[in-house]
């Protein structure tokens, strides 16, 4: 190895270059030895992965268990709302709330809810008989617990010019039934049975009452419809696998029956599949529970695994045919596995950070943990199982066996005597290969298209301005989309689109979105309620809300009864002996906590209920109300908390879902920056950072313009986009910066010719495999399809359009390579001249 110092280059630059060369040669040497080891022991490396798959695959079937707690899965793990719920539950236990409305409860518990909707133009208030029949049928159900009804009207029309806002008509009515389980396992099972019977009853009543539309919801409905996505997607995932297998097989084929590798494409996809099955077995053995978000792992792992498969296949085709097949396998490993190892490491780093304690969404954490295991097994299976398949295929090729029928290819003289169809099937390409053609693999249709047509077209000087304009348009839309990002994620977007929960939510949003959920206002410290200043503070905090308040009702009672209660003893005495004993005010007893110290009674805690008027986006306005009320609890003299069960899902959800992708992005940039001076070429990392950033922002912006919310699925797709972009751009960029052709245009042509086939094969297979997701009636799969389609599309755009043009404008410069070639050519000419002078009778060419 020789290191020549460039004139004017500093000594530190030489040392960095030497270090990069040593690292590069060391990694290539290690991968070369790994390839030799696999080629010498192919049976061992084929058997071990197969045994692991059988062992862990059977375990996966035996230990399969779905996740049953949807709140633990998709709600932020560490949120202030959960602390507030614990405090509210300790002050006002659930068994003390049996006569309150649903929204007043601290946890949803077991319940059944139904919306009765009248036909367009009808009045639901005139359909009392049908409503009462439905209500009586629910109350007569077996295994029911003490229930109560919360009435709400939707689509209300008020009487014109009515001072007391009398209701003229309404379109819908909502009734809720609650089961008291008190946390008992036995009662919870009975409650679950009651909910199942409730849903069946609603379907039966819908058939009996054609004049009413019934939309039902139970406490387990969200979980059931969330899990329903994976059931609906089973057959579609199998169709995706068949499409990917077909695409990989066809794209690996050639007319040359000797060098065509259709079975290698097929076996490569199967290699990724068995690695995913093994990873699933490990997950279930470690007591993991399945949830529908894990549906994306096969697509994520397939996109990375098949990239390694196609790169190894391309690396094999770049080796010399004259070498023994074992040496060819080793050369393919040294050429491909260095970059594949780096990209697999970045996958592990980014998803490992997503699985760290910094991630606040359990679904994202579980997904990232599974993805890390899948990436490790994927890498192991590619170099072992698929490498062994490559060894056997190379042995067949060296012995001149047919790539499909595995029979000896007949000689050219024998073929000439056979029909045309037989010559076409059994031809090894000897007729097409000319005497000056050194690489017969160039006849592969993708490589031929890139070399003969696409490379010349994309580097044409007249095409470059249009590419620049295209990129400006792309960047403009991406930037516009990034400015419109909002955290308006809704749990409904994770459910099957044709499920009862989604239908119920749409009707509720349409007819019952004028008011927010009832917000519990809990005062957890003793107050001087009889003090006029305290009363004024409570009114000020409740201003702007419709309040259900024992304090306000008590003040009105004192005013109407003309009773003076300006001190503590009178206030509490009248409250206990008179106000709370009135039938119309008895329900307020559960809203006040008294304590007795000697002969003196004290109010140590109480609660009120607030309802906010909403107009546009109900969820967004409720979050704004929550963000305004919480700071007031710290700045005011009244210590209080606000809570509603829905706050658990809303509390800092946007921040919780964006943190993983930010951590993953920072991790990737940190790794690339730290290795900036240790990789093959510093400018390779620089261009890689720019390309990945451009693709990530493009996917993020276009995703927003395509109405994709920032939920756990889209965030996982954004983490995957970082790695998918690196996976495809890194080999192309590093080959370009190391190329020694005269011009940048020739270097990018060489890079596209070397890696373009593998990139196009992988992205095409990846995108075709996404098509069946369109036919799964689920919002979760729609989000997955949109995000992954944008990921593949933006990566393909950068690899084949943007980078080939932009790299011809900007560094690295290729002038020093040109000078070196001129110097070598001049030296060669001098040697030839010397030889001619020494031996004028015989000319020796060097």
Image (cartoon, rainbow, N blue to C red):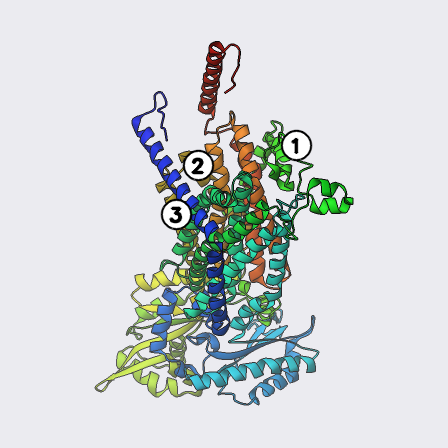
Q: Is mark 2 on a helix, strand or loop?
A: helix
Q: Residue at x 61, y 44 (%)?
A: 259
* Sequence-earlier tag: 3 or 1: 1
State the image quarter where residue 688 is shown: top left
Q: Do the residues labelled 3 and 1 touch (CB within 8 Å)?
A: no
Horizontal side of residue 48 vs 400, given as left or right: left
Residue 434 tag number? 1
**For residue 234, side relative to residue 378 (left or right):** right
Give the number of callouts: 3
- Identify the residue position indicated by label 2 in the image: 684
Give the left or right position of residue 525, taking residue 808 as reference. Answer: left
Please state the horizontal and vertical placement of residue 660, each as a whole percent of the image: 42, 55
Q: How crowded is mark 1: few (under 14 residues within 10 Å), some or many (20 or more)?
A: few
- Could you tell me how far apart the alpha carbons at marks 3 and 1 are, in whole angstroms? 52 Å
Q: In which quarter of the image is the N terminus?
A: top left
Residue that numbered label 3 is attached to: 666
Q: In which quarter of the image is residue 10?
A: top left
Q: Distance between the residues labelled 1 and 2?
A: 37 Å
């Amino acid at each position: 190895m020789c290191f020549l110092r460039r004139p004017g280059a500093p000594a530190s630059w030489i040392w960095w270059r030497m270090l990069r060369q040593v690292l590069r040669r060391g990694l290539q040497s290690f991968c070369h030895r790994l390839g030799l080891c696999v080629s010498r022991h192919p049976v061992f490396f084929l058997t071990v992965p197969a045994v692991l798959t059988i062992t862990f695959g059977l375990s996966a079937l035996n230990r399969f268990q779905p996740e049953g707690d949807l709140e633990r899965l998709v709600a932020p793990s560490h949120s202030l709302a959960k602390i507030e719920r614990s405090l509210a539950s300790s002050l006002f236990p659930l068994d003390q709330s049996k006569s309150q409305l649903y929204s007043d409860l601290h946890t949803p518990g077991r319940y059944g809810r139904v919306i009765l909707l009248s036909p367009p133009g009808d009045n639901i208030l005139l359909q009392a008989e049908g409503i009462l029949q439905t209500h009586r049928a629910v109350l007569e159900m077996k295994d029911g617990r003490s229930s109560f009804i919360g009435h709400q009207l939707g689509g209300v029309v008020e009487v014109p010019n009515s001072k007391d806002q009398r209701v003229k008509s309404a379109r819908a009515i909502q009734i809720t039934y609650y089961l008291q389980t008190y946390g008992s396992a036995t009662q919870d099972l009975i409650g679950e049975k009651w909910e199942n019977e409730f849903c069946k009853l609603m379907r039966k009543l819908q058939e009996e009452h054609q004049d009413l539309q019934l939309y039902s919801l139970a406490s387990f409905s969200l979980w059931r419809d969330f899990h329903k996505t994976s059931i609906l997607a089973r057959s579609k995932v199998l169709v995706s696998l068949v499409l990917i297998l077909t695409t990989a097989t066809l794209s690996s084929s050639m007319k040359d029956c000797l060098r065509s590798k259709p079975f290698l494409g097929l076996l490569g996809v199967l290699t990724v599949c068995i690695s995913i099955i093994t990873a699933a077995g490990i997950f279930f053995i470690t007591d993991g529970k399945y949830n529908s978000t894990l549906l994306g792992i096969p697509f994520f792992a397939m996109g990375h695994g098949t990239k390694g498969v196609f790169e190894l296949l391309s690396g094999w085709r770049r080796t010399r045919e004259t070498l023994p097949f074992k040496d060819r396998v080793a050369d393919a490993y040294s050429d491909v596995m260095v970059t594949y190892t780096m990209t697999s490491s970045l996958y592990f780093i980014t998803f490992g950070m997503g699985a760290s304690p910094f991630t606040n969404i359990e679904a994202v954490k579980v997904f990232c943990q599974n993805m890390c295991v899948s990436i490790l097994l994927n890498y192991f299976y590619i170099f072992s199982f698929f490498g062994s398949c490559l060894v056997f295929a190379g042995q067949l090729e060296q012995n001149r066996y047919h790539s499909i029928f595995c029979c000896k290819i007949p000689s050219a003289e024998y073929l000439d005597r056979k029909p045309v169809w037989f010559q076409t099937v059994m031809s090894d390409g000897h007729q097409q290969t000319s005497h000056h053609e050194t690489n017969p693999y160039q006849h592969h249709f993708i490589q031929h298209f890139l070399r003969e047509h696409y490379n010349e077209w994309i580097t044409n000087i007249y095409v470059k301005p249009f590419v620049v304009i295209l990129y400006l348009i792309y960047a403009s839309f991406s930037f516009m989309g990034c400015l419109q990002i909002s955290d308006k994620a809704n749990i409904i977007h994770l459910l099957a689109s044709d499920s009862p929960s989604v239908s119920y939510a749409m009707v509720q949003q349409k007819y019952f979105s004028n008011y927010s959920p009832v917000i519990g206002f809990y005062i957890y410290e003793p107050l001087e309620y009889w003090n006029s200043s305290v009363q004024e503070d409570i009114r000020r905090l409740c201003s702007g809300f419709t309040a259900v308040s024992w304090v306000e009702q008590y003040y009105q009672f004192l005013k109407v009864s003309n009773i003076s209660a300006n001190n503590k003893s009178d206030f509490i005495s009248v409250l206990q002996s008179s106000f709370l004993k009135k039938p119309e005010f008895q329900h307020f007893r559960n809203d006040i906590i008294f304590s007795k110290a000697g002969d003196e009674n004290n109010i140590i805690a109480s609660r009120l209920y607030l309802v906010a008027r909403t107009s546009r986006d109900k969820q967004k306005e409720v979050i704004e109300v929550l963000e305004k009320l919480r700071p007031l609890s710290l700045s005011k003299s009244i210590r209080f908390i606000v809570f509603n069960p829905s706050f658990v899902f809303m509390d800092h959800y946007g921040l919780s879902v964006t943190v993983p992708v930010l951590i993953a992005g920072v991790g990737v940039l940190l790794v690339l920056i730290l290795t900036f001076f240790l990789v093959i070429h510093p400018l390779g990392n620089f261009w890689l950072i720019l390309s990945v950033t451009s693709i990530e922002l493009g996917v993020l912006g276009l995703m927003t313009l395509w109405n994709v919310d920032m939920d756990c699925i889209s965030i996982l797709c954004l983490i995957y986009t970082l790695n998918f972009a690196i996976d495809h751009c890194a080999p192309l960029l590093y080959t370009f910066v190391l190329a020694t052709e005269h011009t940048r245009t020739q270097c990018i042509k060489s890079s596209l010719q070397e890696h373009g086939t593998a990139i196009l094969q992988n992205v095409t297979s990846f995108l075709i495999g996404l098509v069946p997701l369109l036919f799964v009636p689920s919002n979760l799969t729609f989000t997955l399809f949109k995000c992954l389609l944008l990921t593949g599309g933006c990566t393909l755009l950068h690899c084949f359009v943007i980078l080939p043009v932009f790299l011809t404008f900007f560094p690295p410069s290729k002038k020093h390579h040109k000078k070196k070639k001129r110097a070598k050519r001049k030296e060669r000419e001098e040697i030839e001249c010397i030889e001619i002078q020494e031996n004028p009778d015989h000319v020796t060419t060097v």
